[in-house]
Image (spheres, rainbow, N blue to C red):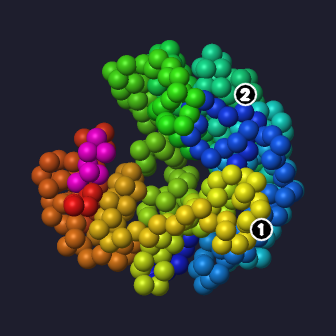
Amino acid sequence: MTQTDTHYSLYIHIPWCVKKCPYCDFNSHEKRDDYNEEAYVDALIRDLKTEAPNVKGRTLKSIFIGGGTPSLFSAKSLGKILSQVDQQLNKTRDIEITLEANPGTFEAEKFSAFRQTGINRLSIGIQSFNDPHLKTLGRIHDSDQAHRAIKMAQDAGFERINLDLMFGLPEQTVEQAVQDVEHALSYQTGHLSQYQLTLEKNTLFYAHPPILPIDEQIWDMQTECQKQIANQLSQYEVSAYAAKQQQSQHNVNYWQFGDYIGIGAGAHGKLTNNNGQISRYWKKKQPREYMNTAGTLKSIGGENIVIESELPFEFMMNALRLKSGFTLQQFTQRTRLHPSTIEPTLTTLIDKQLLEISDSIYSCTDQGWNFLNNTLEHFLPTA
């Protein structure tokens, strides 16, 4: 196992939010009868202790606390979890610890306390600075609260802040999408994520679809927003832009097909054993069921061993999202497969001008990136 292979990440899932957004298909639950912060923290700690032996001898490089709305929890609770991480796992000295947060006043007022726990990066779910659009998206904050939250995060000492934006919203114009980007860039936070609104199954929007902009408008929004963002940040992933040294190390680990453990209701993990076998697993989704079983085998919701024929697609589905691409050495390191298993496909994609190679690095062309799903289909296993 190489030095790179010894690094891994930790995902911590906190499933509750004040209100379920109509577009959200994540494992999130409105804060109701099953909400018990103290019991859930205890469950996370039991879960962590059962995961620790699976990564013995390896080094934790990043932590991401997601949800739901994890900033609903107190700094004391988050500090208790992170203290257990210190005791159970071996961390890098410059570990990145990210907390997802919403701009609601209640959460924003806790930013300074979050910083004191060791959390050194915030990811704030702005989505839009336009009040009618925020109302359509079911967000509980308004544009004034969004602006205040960013300022409060900066005043709390956070030097690494990501702002999440969405585009392609109902009744949104190209000008409004660009205006959202301009507002976000004015804070010079160093990282911006921008996602197109899609109608996912098991969401209110999927059951009752809003009228979205036509494809031509969405394309114009994407290209015009990218022009604005390029004035300040560099695109390093399909939906992510960053200043120098501000890339999300946690997400880059995902995209480089790295390993990670997951604790919390519905949390996913991916681990490679000493024989190179890769398994994906996930915990029970319902908070009450998770809390009752955490720390035991009954907390596992399921597991999938990635078979050899699926590895090229699994690797590419992540690696080709990065502008930086990949080398054959990285492919072999992560999958334990010989480069010959994908070299004919790479040649085909280069001939189709979907991939390019420079200094032994394979990456998508602009066309390959714009039609990434079509590019990835070439790596699907054949029957």
Q: Which residues fall within the magenta stretch?
A: 371-378
Image quadrant in which you'd find residue 372: top left
Q: Residues within 10 Å of mark 1 (few under 14, many from 20)?
A: many
Confirm whether residue 162 shows in the render. Answer: yes
| On screen, residue 178 above or below 200 | above
- Regarding residue 119, the answer to whether it shows in the image is no
Hey, which quadrant is residue 124 in on the image? top right
Q: Position of residue 149 (x, y in %)?
A: 74, 34
Name the amino acid type tagged 2.
Ile
Q: Earlier in the sequence, mark 1 or mark 2?
A: 1
Q: Nearer the viewer, residue 281 or 190?
A: 281
Seen at 45% across and 58% down, the residue is 255
Name the residue located 74 percent from the left edge and 38 percent from the top edge: 30
Residue found 76% across the figure and 36% down from its top: 18
Which residue ends up furthest to the left in the rendered image? 351
Find out whether residue 85 is within the magenta segment: no
Q: Which residue is mark 2?
A: 140
Residue 211 position, x and y percent, is 47, 17
Question: With respect to residue 15, does 55 lie above or below?
Answer: below
- The residue that label 1 is drawn on is 45
Mark 1 lies on a secondary structure that is helix
Residue type, mark 1 in image: Ile
Taking the magenta stretch, the answer to whether it contains residue 373 is yes
- Taking the image as shown, residue 376 lies to the left or right of residue 70, namely left
Tell me how far mark 1 sits from mark 2, CA to CA. 30 Å
Relative horizontal placement of residue 178, taking residue 329 as reference (left or right): right
Q: Main secondary structure of the magenta part?
A: helix
